[in-house]
Amino acid sequence: MVVIDAPPVPGTRRVSAAVAAAGVSSFALLYAPQPVLPQLAEAFRLDPGSASLAIGVATTSLAVAVLPVAWMAGLVGRRRVILWYVVLSAVIGLLLPLAPSFPVLLVMRAVQGVAIAGFAGVAAAYLADVVGTARLTGSVGAMIAGNSVGGMLGRLGAGFAAEPMGWHGALLTVAVVSGLCALYAARTLPQSTGRTAGRTRSVPLGEPARQADAGRRLGGGLVAPFAVGALAMGAFVALYNAAGFRLTAPPLSLTPAAASLVFLAYAMGTASSAAAGRVASRLGRSKALVAALLLTAAGSGLTVSTSLPLVVAGFAVLTAGFFAAHAIANAWVAAEAAPHVRGRAAGVYTLCYYLGSGAGGTVGSIVYGHAGWTWLIALTSAWLLLAIAAVLIRRRSHSPTRMSAYSQTTETHCR
């Protein structure tokens, strides 16, 4: 007797919309401080590296909490954990503007990061439970599109509100919108199978061996998407953490509100993540992932220019590339892991992703503060090249002539 995929439930669009709303809420809150980092630095007399801890502390605590939260979700139900934690993160967002000092703000952000882990670490496995792996890439793409919309709205809302209302009003504005999205998700998200993420039945003799093979590949065959999650996210967050400082400084010298318009580039990420499944089905997963990472690196290279149109175009291109890469890598993990280790695999991916965010974002801000934008681009491009190398090495070692029959089936299935 083994655990196999549960059949998908009806209403895939409803599921995707509810998860997207939870993603909007979570990621608007997670990155709301990013456009006001210069204001936080001024208010608390901080350098760029120290101010970036407002992002790094939250993403690092999220990473640390992902695996325990994913384990708990397996016990009490994934839907329940998603809803509890999405609502909790919104409540903390409402309290965040009351922080009397930067250390207190960091403590609150750390707690908020743990709460956001309840969505980030569980959502992909929840989607696999309720829609099945056949439609998983599309549903994960919709989820990541919601995440990118949330990131964009949170950053834009905070950026525009910061000038007339200060950083306190900016964070409060985002928290109110996020709270409304959390309430929508709470009313709409359908029941998942939770602890019984699959169903049990008798299977042919060869199937347990294939399931065991998939379980072993949690540690081996999934190293490439884990590396992509850590390295690409580190590069992405590092660039956006420093963007506000660079755009408001000479020679560009934009106002905070105008600088926040760079986050409109997230619309490109919304489109590219939603289209990632179609691209992967045409090119194959590995080729599509390499192409997305190369696009990210090319876009970051454009931002070295001192021409504002080229800088804006660069952010649009790198954002489109990054979110496509994230969607493909995330779906890769959820689809290749056996059902009984899928929650753990999703948790490990999210752990790598947000450890990359916390470490990469902070290191990148320090490099920018001491060496400037060109050196930051050099550093993040090196990270992206390492991610590409990980994908190519995995592709070579799992070429069709070396793959087992089960590996070939899952490779085709994920496309």
Image (tube, grey):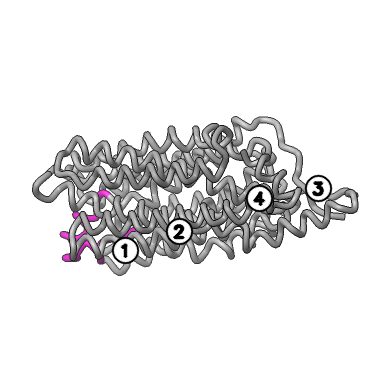
Label 2 sits on a secondary structure element that is helix
Q: Nearer the viewer, mark 3 or mark 2?
A: 2
Q: Quick one: label 4, few (<14), some, or many (20+) residues within 10 Å?
A: many
Please, which residue is most extreme toward the bottom here? 103
Q: Amino acid at mark 1?
A: Thr
Tell me whether circle 1 and circle 4 mark residues in contact (CB < 8 Å).
Answer: no
Mark earlier in primary sequence (3, 4): 3
Q: Quick one: label 1, few (<14), some, or many (20+) residues within 10 Å?
A: many
- Residue drawn at x 38%, y 64% as measured from the top left: 359
Q: Where is residue 302 drawn, in percent x and y?
A: 25, 43
User: Could you give the CA–CA distance between mark 3 and mark 4, rounded to whole angstroms?
Assistant: 18 Å
User: Could you give the CA–CA distance between mark 1 and mark 3, rounded to whole angstroms?
Assistant: 43 Å
Label 1 sits on a secondary structure element that is helix
Q: Amino acid at mark 2?
A: Ala
Q: Nearer the viewer, residue 216 or 160?
A: 216
Tell me whether circle 2 and circle 1 mark residues in contact (CB < 8 Å).
Answer: no
Task: From the image, tell me which residue sits under label 1.
Answer: 362
- Quadrant location of the N terminus? bottom right
Q: Where is residue 80 drawn, in percent x and y?
A: 62, 50
Q: Nearer the viewer, mark 1 or mark 3?
A: 1
Q: Residues in magenta?
A: 35-55
Q: Main secondary structure of the magenta part?
A: helix
Q: Nearer the viewer, mark 3 or mark 4?
A: 4
